[in-house]
Image (cartoon, rainbow, N blue to C red):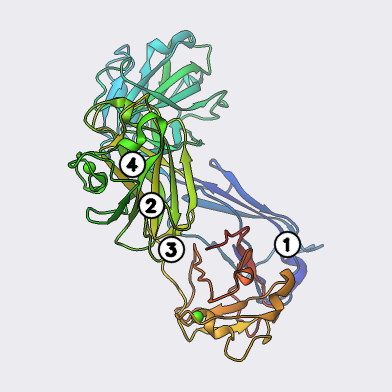
């Protein structure tokens, strides 16, 4: 948020501000509606002058349609008023979790015990029409199965809208389960995994009111089962809900392509079941006998699109022998120029997935999502155990590494740069840090764990950055960066330490050594 002070009377400037968000369809007045507190800024420093702008950053992962900005206190004391010249709301178009269901998606009710006009289709029709199921009376379970037509989705939240009447019928305890079965034919059949249980939901305070819930989940699914285990009750009648939204995203896309360079953990495979089958976009299988008896096997892939950031993996089971499917895997990344063999090179662990649930069918895909902010050129996938016991081998039909290309550099050689000091050799000044060459920037201020660095003003103007790439210099690894602080400012800057107001973007601690 930016706040610009007005022309006079500093006592009228804000000192405490709250920012709230609402997703009501319409806001008709200052006091109405449902509002979430996003942030409260306490004790805002006094402005240094008139028409000056202060910038405040805060964490918020949720998207809103409306914002309410409230000055709770002024710098004061002011017997007059509050005043502000300009308020800026800094952000972007919301790209976080959104409803993955849509009207027309395949639905299976827990039973047909509903009034004719209040069937399960009303739960996912995008309208305040209600789904009512009498099975949900007296704290019994009821619900539905939905198969999003989007395909496999990664859900991390849920939105529930209360129906027109009878608050005792609203959900109080809910579970959400996921399935990757090819088909779900009945509400009570199939293989299901618990994604989240939401206990003790506070009572809705109005009709047609929407509540959102978010939860941790690391898996994508094709089908979801939504079960109300208890109502706000006591209700001798039923469970009812006006609308259910499952909030999530379609998993990211595959960064590998058939033909990408591959290195198998060994050539201990049948001639027609070599490593190329793991990344050929077909259900053909990669089988490696090294993976027998819970021994590790796998491969390295170098995506031809260059450096990528991956946050998920898709693994498709092969045609037979479920005991050969992976049970535990690790994924590592490397930025070495070249990888010459499976067992060499510098590798950094991205994630380990333990206890992969058994695949419930052949040629079936499971998708796992994980946190990762590191971009890499190469990936090493290792199955460290199979579902087993398998005296034969490890096998997999297909693997997709899910993510996107690493963000691109916003700086260019020639951008304005200020060093933290000129304590550098003549040929190793700060310009070398941004010249697109392996020439080095060396600053002696950085000796003995002291800070040093530079300020850069990208020539392309205001930018949003989400990453940083750093290349080691020619010698002396002890001089490499270990902890980096990155700050941004919208002030005009004329030097390293010229009084500009900097906001912390990120601090990266404990950067691994390379090589
Ligand atoms: Ca509805
Ligand atoms: Ca394949
Ligand atoms: Ca350089």
Marks 2/3: CA–CA distance: 13 Å
Residue placed most toward the observer, 309 or 110: 309
Residue beneath label 3, please?
336
Residue placed most toward the observer, 354 or 121: 354
Horizontally, is 243 left or right of 511 in the view? left
Marks 1/4: CA–CA distance: 47 Å
166 is higher (above) or lower (below) than 93? above
Residue beneath label 2, please?
342
Q: Is residue 100 visible?
A: yes
Residue beneath label 4, please?
314
Horizontally, is 458 left or right of 325 in the view? right
Residue placed most toward the observer, 259 or 76: 259
Tell me the element at label 3. loop
Tell which residue pokes out farthest to the left in this image.
272
Horizontally, is 442 left or right of 81 in the view? left
Crowding at dot 3, Cα within 10 Å, few <14 / some 14-19 / many 20+, comes out as some
| Nearest to N terminus: mark 2 or mark 3 | 3
CB-based contact (under 8 Å), mark 4 and mark 2? no
| Nearest to N terminus: mark 1 or mark 3 | 1
Q: Residue 439's x, y, as percent?
A: 50, 82
Residue beneath label 1, please?
44
103 is higher (above) or lower (below) than 66? above
Marks 3/4: CA–CA distance: 25 Å
């Amino acid at each position: 948020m930016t706040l610009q002070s007005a022309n006079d009377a500093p006592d009228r400037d804000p000192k405490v501000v709250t920012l709230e968000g609402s997703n009501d369809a319409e806001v008709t007045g200052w006091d109405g509606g449902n509002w979430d507190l996003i942030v409260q800024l306490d004790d805002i420093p006094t402005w240094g002058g008139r028409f000056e702008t202060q910038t405040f950053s805060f964490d918020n992962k949720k998207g809103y349609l409306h914002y309410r900005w409230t000055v709770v206190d002024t710098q004061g004391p002011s017997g007059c008023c509050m005043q502000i010249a300009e308020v800026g709301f800094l952000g972007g178009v919301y790209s976080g979790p959104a409803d993955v269901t849509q009207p027309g998606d395949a639905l299976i009710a827990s039973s047909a015990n509903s009034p004719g006009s209040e069937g399960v289709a009303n739960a996912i029709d995008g309208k305040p029409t209600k789904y009512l199921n009498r099975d949900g009376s007296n704290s019994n379970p009821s619900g539905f199965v939905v198969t999003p037509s989007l395909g496999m989705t990664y859900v991390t939240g849920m939105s529930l809208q209360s129906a027109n009447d009878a608050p005792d019928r609203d959900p109080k305890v809910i579970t959400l389960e996921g399935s990757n079965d090819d088909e779900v034919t009945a509400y009570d059949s199939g293989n299901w995994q618990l994604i989240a249980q939401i206990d003790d939901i506070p009572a809705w305070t109005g009709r047609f009111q929407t509540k959102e819930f978010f939860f941790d989940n690391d898996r994508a699914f094709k089908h979801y089962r939504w079960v109300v285990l208890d109502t706000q009750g006591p209700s001798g009648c039923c469970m009812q809900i006006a609308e259910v939204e499952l909030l999530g995203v379609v998993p990211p896309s595959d960064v590998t392509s058939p033909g990408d360079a591959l290195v198998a953990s060994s050539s201990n495979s049948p001639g027609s079941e070599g490593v190329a089958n793991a990344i050929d976009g077909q259900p053909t299988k990669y089988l490696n006998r090294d993976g027998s008896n819970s021994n590790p096997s796998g491969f390295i892939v170098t995506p031809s699109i260059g450096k990528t950031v991956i946050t998920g993996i898709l693994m498709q089971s092969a045609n037979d022998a479920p005991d050969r499917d992976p049970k535990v895997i690790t994924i590592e990344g490397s930025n070495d120029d070249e990888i010459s063999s499976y067992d060499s090179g510098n590798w950094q662990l991205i994630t380990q997935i333990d206890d992969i649930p058994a695949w419930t069918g052949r040629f079936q895909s499971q998708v796992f999502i994980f946190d990762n902010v590191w971009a890499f050129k190469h990936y090493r996938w290792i199955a460290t155990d199979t579902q087993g016991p398998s005296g034969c081998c490890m096998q997999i039909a297909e693997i997709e590494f899910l993510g996107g290309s690493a963000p691109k550099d916003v700086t260019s050689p020639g951008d304005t740069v200020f060093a933290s000091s000129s304590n550098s050799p003549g040929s190793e000044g700060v310009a070398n840090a941004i010249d697109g060459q392996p020439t080095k920037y060396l600053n002696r201020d950085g000796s003995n764990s002291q800070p040093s660095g530079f300020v850069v003003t990208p020539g392309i103007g205001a930018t949003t950055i989400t990453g940083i790439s750093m290349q080691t210099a020619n010698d002396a690894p002890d001089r490499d960066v270990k902890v980096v602080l990155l700050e941004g400012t919208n002030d005009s800057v004329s030097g390293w330490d010229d009084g500009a107001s900097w906001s912390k973007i990120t601090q990266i601690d404990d950067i691994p050594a390379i090589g």
